[in-house]
Amino acid sequence: MVYESRNDIDERYKWDLSDIIESDERVEEIFKEISEEYKEIVKFRGSLNDPDRLLKCLKAESAVGEKLSRLYVYSKMNLDEDARVTKYKAMTSRAEALAVEVSSAVSFIVPEIVASYSAEEITALSRKKEFSDFSYTLELIAKKKEHYLSDKEERILAEVGAFSGMFEDAFRMFDNADISFKSVIKNGEEIEMSHGEYSVLLQDSDRTVRKDAFESMFNAFKNMINTIAVLYAGNVKKDCFYAKMRNYSGAMEASVAGEDVTIDVYNNLIKSAHNALPTLHRYMDVRRRALGVEKLHMYDMHVSIVEGDNIAVSYEEAKEIVKKALLPLGEEYGKLLDKAFNEGWIDVFESKGKRSGAYSWGTYSSHPYVLLNYQKTTHDVFTIAHELGHAMHSYYSNSSLPYEKAGYEIFVAEVASTVNEVLLLKYLMREKPEMKKFLLSYFLDMFRTTLFRQTQFAEFEKIAHEAEERGESLTPEYLCDVYYKLNAEYYGNGVENDELIRYEWARIPHFYSSFYVYKYATGIVSAVTIADAISSGDKEAVDNYKRFLSAGGSMSPVEILKLAGVDLTKEDAFDRAMSVMSETLSELEKLA
């Protein structure tokens, strides 16, 4: 249900944002404080060659950054409660504007460090006790020193950045506002097609409805393929330009280096996915037989092959299910879950004006928060576990580290949330055997969509950027042919490689945030490996996982994952995740 007003919801089910900032009156004071304090940072300009001045500057920047974070998060989360509240619209806009102002003012710091010290000197500073809070920041600057440019060149690149994002802007405008789809007929009624409706129609039990939705979607992109190809080719050229200017071997290296990851992780993922394609093809055959069709089509991938028993439980019951599922993580973790459920961390129910979906957010000085829009569905129970995974990751990191090291990279951001989902899945399979067939299918679809599909996307990006770097032209025909060939390879001979699927690449918004999607795949590889070890009863695996949760952004995300027993520089972790998929498929085959 949707509440007409937040006032109708019991206070137990609403978050308490006063743990971030006490009141709106205090917000005004913080605005004034930041406006004065960041101007003091600018006074350090030209003097950072003195280590004492550098340390004071870094501490001052950090203090302002933490305060600015609280200001923005408080404003935005109040707005997410009800987007119609004008006061919080204005407050959020002011916070965003101030953040841009501060960022511009302090942008001199890194270029001046690079210009003032050699890589060896920066590394030496990072090892001094007084710089311990900034050690990893300085290590990264030393590592990337050769990729920083002169102050003048950096300013030029910054100006280019003001319009280089317009390829994505143009695509999103077309994708969200201008695209037109043919309507779909369902049960004699005309359904107006949209991106959201498409995902619903692809799960329809009527194959004709799925086929019509598929054709409606991809004919719309086929009709605009020349324009979209120009936009995407421009985005690829932009990536390659920045990589070249910053002295990287290519766009992929430049992108992964941004999170202190090496390209061998990216390549290991693609290689391991290819090695495991026979397992995916086996699953396709199980899917084909379950649906009772002679050959699968691409519009048969999202409909459930098992009629699942929906977990239609109250929020209070869902809480207990999640808590029991996560018992393998230990007593301490369980007590933190109780705090989250009982001490104003979670905003539970949907009300008019509230932001849709779910997320976990917060600040360093507060506990994490979770936004839900809980309904009585299986998906919503999994969402509770997922978002609390994010929240616990932030809690452990913030509790263990100084502000400067607590924030973790996107590369590891989905690991803790997916670990919780897998543990919940395993618990439900034990406790609800009547749902086991459905849950096995659910798990296998997680592998197909998050591991194989995202790796297919990642391989497409790799091929496109390497072609541009070789001087080849990214024509519509070239891009469609590359994608069509990849799709055939990933899904195998048991699936009809429908002609329209060649245009699927053209509808993926993430391709304008290049080399991003592979993180979804490495995330599930890591999470499945960790959850498998934890659920086996390995006490050391739990302790290692807590070390991972507590590591924040204190070192390379690849090194942080090693704390939990996952080494993505080697193929073992990928192979273990693929074997879990194979074992899951074997179980489903027996039941089927």
Image: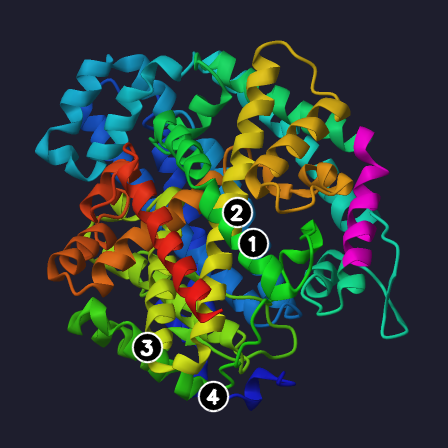
Q: CA distance from mark 4 to mark 3?
A: 21 Å
13 sits to left or right of 335:
right
User: Which residue sits furthest top?
Assistant: 471
User: Secondary structure under badge 3?
Assistant: helix
CB within 8 Å, label 1 to label 3: no
Quick one: quadrant of the N terminus?
bottom right
Q: CA distance from mark 1 to mark 4?
A: 37 Å
Where is mark 4, residue-wise? 314
36 versus 358 height, above or below? above
Magenta highlight range: 211-226
Amino acid carrying label 4: it is Ser
CB within 8 Å, label 2 to label 1: yes
- Looking at the rendered image, the disc whose residue lies closer to the viewer, 4 or 3, is 3
Q: CA distance from mark 2 to mark 3?
A: 27 Å
Mark 3 burial class by Cα count in 10 Å: few <14, some 14-19, many 20+? few
Amino acid carrying label 3: it is Arg
Where is mark 1, residue-wise? 285
User: Which residue sits furthest left?
Assistant: 129
27 versus 120 height, above or below? below
User: Secondary structure under badge 1?
Assistant: helix
Q: CA distance from mark 2 to mark 1?
A: 6 Å
Q: Is residue 257 visible?
A: yes
Q: Residue at x 48, y 41 (%)?
A: 277
N-terminal-most mark, 2 or 3: 2
The number of numbered discs placed on residues in the rendered structure image is 4
Where is mark 2, residue-wise? 281
222 versus 160 height, above or below? below
